[in-house]
Image (spheres, grey):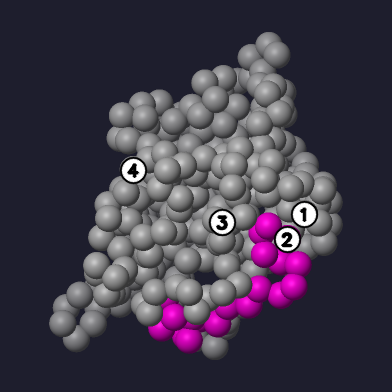
């Protein structure tokens, strides 16, 4: 994979709006590195976090979440998910469900106004029933996944009540009308340049990331969801794993590998931009360095 090329992001304006971001525990999943990264040791299976993020829009005080981690009652998931967790064990120790992490940080789940889900996979949607006052925001493509979910499709990993239908907003292709930095399709969520929902193709339909300003003077964070499962893919040190099965079909952690690789390249270009923090949902090394520390609610991830 080529070394990421640099890009630029817009300069802060006078009285620039921004957000504050705090990490949240969301349970853990064992992810064999060989499933995601080409040419690595087969025996390496890190215990990876399913990180979620609490976001406060400073001008309005709006409370958002990005992703909800794992749900504790995994038996409620479709059979396809239960088959996966037999191979990729999940654990949600006491106090590490997202709703518990919020309460421990002094925030009631009922006070959350918006939940943006990166995508509908089981390790990101948590238990939505705790967020009774929130509007759920999903990327273009998620609606079709829900319409063709389990049990209509017995092999689907998605179940139809994953999100509350009456409180869910599906972003359309037309909503992604802004380009910013290396990303051609983004949605300026508040309309003030503080938080962009970025179309993140490749991993699965409807996959989105968040690019947000974390200070009024030029700091940013990029919450990359499942864009990559190892930071060496973002830096260009390694390539996305895949294999061809006996029927000639490509098997990969991403539904569309070429699109995923291109988006990874775009995200990697942010590493050359000053004061941009790129954070993956399953970055176990970052978690080990920061768990229990100031980056987690009630603290916040410091601006770079």
Say whether residue 62 is left or right of residue 95: left
Gap in angstroms between the C-alphas marked 1 and 3:
15 Å
Magenta region, residue range: 81-100
Gap in angstroms between the C-alphas marked 4 and 1:
31 Å
Kindly identify which numbered label has been placed on residue 129.
Answer: 3
Q: Are marks 2 and 4 in contact (CB under 8 Å)?
A: no
Q: Quadrant of the N terminus?
A: bottom left
Query: Where 250 sits versus 193, above or below?
Result: below
Residue lying at 52% horizontally and 66% vertically, measured from the top left: 123
Residue lying at 81% horizontally and 56% vertically, measured from the top left: 104
Foreground label between 2 and 3: 3
Q: Which residue is mark 1?
A: 103
Q: Is residue 90 magenta?
A: yes
Say whether residue 151 is left or right of residue 183: left
State which tag comes first along the sequence, 1 or 3. 1
State which tag comes first along the sequence, 2 or 4. 2
Residue 295 visible = no
Foreground label between 4 and 1: 1
């Amino acid at each position: 994979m080529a070394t990421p090329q640099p890009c630029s992001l817009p300069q802060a304006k006078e009285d620039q709006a921004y957000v504050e971001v705090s990490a949240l525990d969301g349970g853990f999943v064992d992810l064999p590195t060989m499933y995601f990264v080409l040419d690595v040791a087969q025996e390496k299976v890190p215990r990876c976090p399913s990180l979620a993020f609490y976001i406060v829009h400073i001008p309005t005080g709006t409370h958002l979440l990005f992703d909800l981690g794992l749900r504790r009652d995994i038996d409620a998931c479709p059979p396809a998910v239960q088959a996966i967790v037999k191979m990729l064990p999940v654990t949600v120790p006491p106090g590490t469900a997202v709703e518990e992490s919020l309460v421990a940080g002094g925030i009631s789940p009922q006070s959350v106004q918006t939940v943006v889900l990166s995508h509908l996979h089981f390790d990101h949607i948590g238990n939505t029933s705790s967020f009774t006052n929130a509007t759920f925001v999903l990327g273009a493509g998620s609606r079709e996944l829900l319409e063709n979910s389990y049990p209509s499709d017995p092999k689907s990993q998605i179940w139809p009540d994953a999100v509350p239908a009456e409180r869910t907003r599906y972003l359309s292709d037309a909503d992604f009308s802004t380009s910013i930095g290396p990303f051609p399709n983004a949605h300026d969520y508040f309309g003030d340049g503080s938080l962009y929902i970025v179309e993140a193709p490749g991993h699965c339909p409807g996959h989105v990331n968040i690019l947000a300003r974390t200070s009024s003077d030029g700091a940013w964070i990029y919450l990359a969801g499942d864009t990559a499962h190892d930071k060496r893919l973002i830096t260009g040190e390694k390539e996305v794993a895949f294999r061809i099965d006996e029927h000639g079909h490509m098997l990969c952690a991403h539904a569309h590998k070429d699109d995923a690789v291109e988006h990874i390249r775009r995200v990697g270009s942010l590493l050359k931009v000053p004061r941009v923090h790129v954070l993956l949902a399953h970055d176990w090394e970052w978690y080990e360095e920061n768990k229990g520390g100031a980056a987690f609610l009630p603290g916040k991830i410091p601006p770079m």
